[in-house]
Amino acid sequence: PRISGRMIHGDAVDDEWLAVWLLREATREYDELIVSVRDSDGEFLLAEAAMHIPHWITPENSEHR
């Protein structure tokens, strides 16, 4: 089974983060739930997380992380 959705938030980026938070909370409630979030730039959570990756992690030593 698969559920997908689409949200148009315009310039209200806080609404995008609210949706992410709600989806995250849902994954806490349902262990079998998998969530993927994308926007017009792609998987923006990966871009946000990249700002916090330790400097020693490289593509060569981080396969499957």
Image (tube, helix red, strand yellow):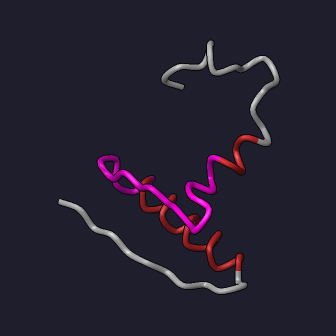
Asked whether, in this view, residue 37 is left or right of residue 34, the answer is right
Most common secondary structure along the magenta stretch: loop
Which of 41 and 5 lies nearest the eye of the viewer?
Answer: 41
Asked whether, in this view, residue 35 is left or right of residue 17, the answer is left
For the magenta stretch, what is the residue range? 28-46
Q: Residue at x 45, y 53 (%)?
A: 28
> Outermost residue, left direction?
1
Asked whether, in this view, residue 35 is left or right of residue 40, the answer is left
Residue 62 is situated, as x and y percent measured from the top left of the image, at 60, 19
Residue 39 is situated, as x and y percent measured from the top left of the image, at 56, 67
Q: Residue at x 72, y 51 (%)?
A: 48
Residue 15 is situated, as x and y percent measured from the top left of the image, at 64, 79
> Outermost residue, top direction?
61
Q: Quadrant of residue 53?
A: top right
**Which quarter of the rendered picture does the N terminus lie within?**
bottom left
Instruction: Classify 22 as above or below 43.
Output: below
